[in-house]
Amino acid sequence: MSEGAVVCVVGLGYIGLPTATILATTGSTVIGVDVSERTVEAVNAGRVPFVEPDLETVVAGVVAQGRLRAQVEMPEAEVYIVAVPTPFADDHDVDDSYVRQAAEAIAPRLRGGELIILESTSPPGLTERMADYVLAERADLTGDAGTRHSLYFAHCPERVLPGRIMAEIVENDRIIGGVSTEAAERARDLYATFCRGQLLLTDARTAELAKLAENSYRDVNIAFANELSIICDRLGIDVWELITLANHHPRVNILSPGPGVGGHCIAVDPWFIVAAAPEEARLIRSAREVNDAKPQFVVEKVMARAARFREPVIAALGIAFKADVDDLRESPSRAIVGQLADEMAHARLLVVEPHVEALPAELADRPNVEHRELQAAVAEADIVLVLVDHASFAAMDREALVDKVVIDTKGLWR
Ligand SMILES: NC(=O)c1ccc[n+]([C@@H]2O[C@H](COP(=O)([O-])OP(=O)(O)OC[C@H]3O[C@@H](n4cnc5c(N)ncnc54)[C@H](O)[C@@H]3O)[C@@H](O)[C@H]2O)c1
């Protein structure tokens, strides 16, 4: 990358903002673009509009130094990194409208020679489609014989763990898939400015499927643990003890069961493989179905245990999709609480989620759901339902649980 080059990061969320920030610390001038005025204002004030440890201090520093600024308008830049959402549509195929909007906003700003990297998780072929969206607006930049050599497109999927993003963004190995070899090499030069992990070059489609395969691997293995937990429940066996014992085998490492699988990666990405190869992706589809069925199993368990109370009070601990984050997307615990509130109009649900200031509207609007502090909720509850293994729950004084019915989907207090 040439000296003084401007890098534009499009989408300042969990992935885009840390990427923009880390690039700014290595000396690049970075402009972050987001369609959300609120996000733009927060970043320009040196604030982070979501919870991610260690990020805010660095954002505040690079903004104060003038190395990072945010805006709604798309600027001219030498490099664009697109990190916008890629949710799935009703048919489980990708909703690529955010990528398309980003591509169409970038297109008029191009002069030729730019590198455009898609970091959003993508089904095979989306990086090439993004190139098509750009070139549909800018036929003048198509390059010789359609080789696209006047623009460089690459896919560099992100595999950071929320809660550890600032460490992992530097340390993790990265897969860099170019639509052309030169695009991959240019992208590698950019990531080399801040990544200490290996930079592994391939083509764009392989990079796209590699990311999906990683999350499907996790999903299939969690499905195995969740299926075991249901089998154990049927057979009256403690699944946690079972897994601990089985994992003493030197080549076995069974993961932990839970209330389902959430977040917008593991619960979403395998569907992109199913959509791309519906006949072939049989195990991957089954794993999704097993994990998606687990919340219903938990709901039925709670309802069965609550049957002996006339007006049960249920403390539901956690609605984030995993421990110690504020991210509620695709959260199975959030869905469980909603369904319990619907099916048990005679019950009160005291939801404890210390990582959010308010419950999402679909829960807050229900008359039998309240957002409460941990101690007060547990003290009042007949049933304590653990849905997320937040550190603050693990640290709780267990004396408070005496005389309570405890349903612990995470094995937190065993
Ligand atoms: N969060 C993770 O842990 C994680 C990990 C790996 C990969 N990913 C992938 O990274 C991508 C981004 O995920 P995220 O978690 O950062 O999402 P996010 O929702 O936190 O952030 C996306 C941001 O993009 C903005 N945006 C939407 N459309 C835009 C547009 N046209 N132009 C500019 N900004 C736009 C939104 O306002 C939002 O601020 C997704 O494809 C996701 O699957 C996420």
Image (cartoon, rainbow, N blue to C red):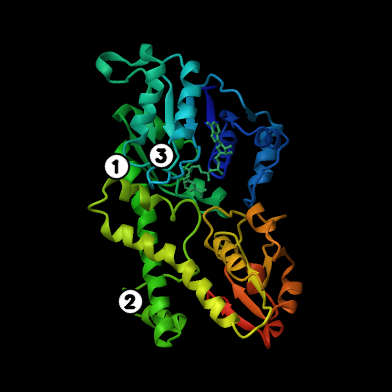
Chain-order first, disc 3 or disc 1: 3
C-alpha distance separating marks 1 and 2 = 32 Å
Q: Is residue 254 visible?
A: no
Q: Position of residue 58 (x, y in %)?
A: 65, 42
- Pointer 2: what residue? 250
Residue 122 as seen in the image, left or right of residue 317: left
Q: Nearer the viewer, mark 2 or mark 3?
A: 3
Judging depth in this view, the residue of 240 and 91 nearest the camera is: 91
Secondary structure type for disc 1 = helix
Kind of residue at badge 2: Pro
Q: Quadrant of the C terminus?
A: bottom right
**At x 54% / y 80%, what residue is drawn?**
304
C-alpha distance separating marks 3 and 1 = 11 Å
Kind of residue at badge 3: Cys
Secondary structure type for disc 3 = loop
C-alpha distance separating marks 2 and 3 = 34 Å
**At x 39% / y 54%, what residue is drawn?**
215
Kind of residue at badge 1: Thr
Q: Is residue 368 visible?
A: yes
- Pointer 1: what residue? 206
- Pointer 3: what residue? 156
Residue 291 as seen in the image, left or right of residue 344: left
Q: Position of residue 248 (x, y in %)?
A: 37, 80
